[in-house]
Amino acid sequence: MSSVRVLYICSAGHSGSTFTDMLLGGHSQMESLGEFSFIGKNLALGELCGCGVPVSDCQAWAPIFNRIIRERGTDLRQSPYEIRQWDTHAVQIIDNQQQTPAFLLGMKLRSAYMKYRYQLPQKLYPFVPFPPRVAGYVHNTNYLYNIIRETRHCQIVIDSSKNIFKALALYENNPKEIRIIFLSRDGRGVYLSKINSNMSQKEAVLSWVGYYKRALPLLAKVVNPEHLFKVRYEDLASQPETILKKICEFAGMSFEPTMLDFTIGIRHSVNGNRNARFNRQKKGIRLDELWRTKLTQEDLKIFNKYGGMTNHCLGYHD
Ligand SMILES: [Zn+2]
């Protein structure tokens, strides 16, 4: 039996991570969690589970919340942030009670610590522990992954939280069970999606470039290459059977043909791209390359100036 227990998806935003998460969730032994780090915010704000009802009312989450009450004495439906998994920074739907300036400052400091820690030689890591709060996040995440697997009777959970330091910390803590899927998408597609979400042109490119500049060298340094699967959104969307078979092999699982039918099954995923989560059945598996017709010459000029090199490094040459 495969020792893999978690597939963690790393990518910049707007790169198809929710789509990938949902596709993998079509496997009978894989449970799609969405951007799991945000479950606290989803509960606090009454946001919807992938099944269409608020996470707090979802029948698939109820036994998990009830088990947490028994084991930890806390009801996440009443205290959503009690078992926090990671620092989260929401940009569209924000819980202002929780995401305060003080919280964001703490998050920035913890992120800076992790950044410098991972720049050290690997042999020093045992002497430079995670900050206590981050160590707690790792512990909590593993606890939640475990009870979800047990309660939902599946072998692997899919977490598309994307945060690179969460990926590295989970992997360092348990390299036998964690596998990383490193997803990229043509930066021009990401760029169009971001400017359509009202981000400025320059910011849209630079935030995407920033993710890969940070993530690529760190993954290469920390993660065993056999535990890292690199995939392009375009390949997954245009040749789903070929790529899903490869991902299943990577995870030590058998491919299931039902994974290719996007219209069946429910995903009790929290947070993530709304379109991918709620229009799955209607849209099916479809490659989105709208950028080819929607981006203007001026858009492309700005993209190439700031992001051309990164796109090239990710294998997009045309
Ligand atoms: Zn649900």
Image (cartoon, grey):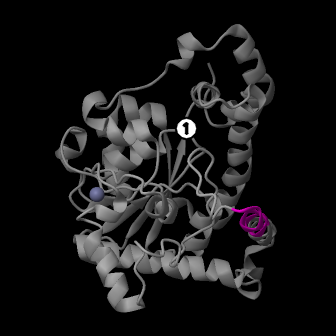
Secondary structure that dominates the magenta span? helix
**Callout 1: few (<14), some (14-19), or many (20+) C-alpha neighbours within 10 Å?**
many
Q: Is residue 227 visible?
A: no
Front-lying residue, 187 or 191: 191
Query: At numbered mark 1, what does the secondary structure look like: helix, strand or loop?
Result: loop
317 is higher (above) or lower (below) than 315: above
- Residue segment shown in magenta: 100-108
Instruction: Give x and y (percent) for residue 192.
Output: 60, 24
Q: Quadrant of residue 314?
A: top right
Indicate the quadrant of ligand 1 in the picture: bottom left
**How many marks can you see?**
1
Instruction: Give x and y (percent) for residue 232.
Output: 50, 38
Q: Residue at x 68, y 36 (%)?
A: 313
28 is higher (above) or lower (below) than 303: below
24 is higher (above) or lower (below) than 188: below
What residue is pinned by disc 1? 14
Front-lying residue, 75 or 158: 75
Q: Is residue 309 visible?
A: yes
91 is higher (above) or lower (below) than 146: above
Instruction: Give x and y (percent) for residue 4.
Output: 38, 69
Question: Which quadrant is the N terminus positioned in?
Answer: bottom left
Residue type at mark 1?
His
Question: Which quadrant is the C terminus positioned in?
Answer: top right
**Can residue 33 be found in the magenta stretch?**
no
Front-lying residue, 96 or 254: 96
Q: From the Cβ of disc 1, is ligand 1 less than 8 Å away?
A: no
Relative side of 47 to 318, left or right = left
Q: Quadrant of residue 12?
A: top right
Q: Residue at x 33, y 40 (%)?
A: 278
Front-lying residue, 138 or 7: 138
Instruction: Give x and y (percent) for residue 176.
Output: 46, 75
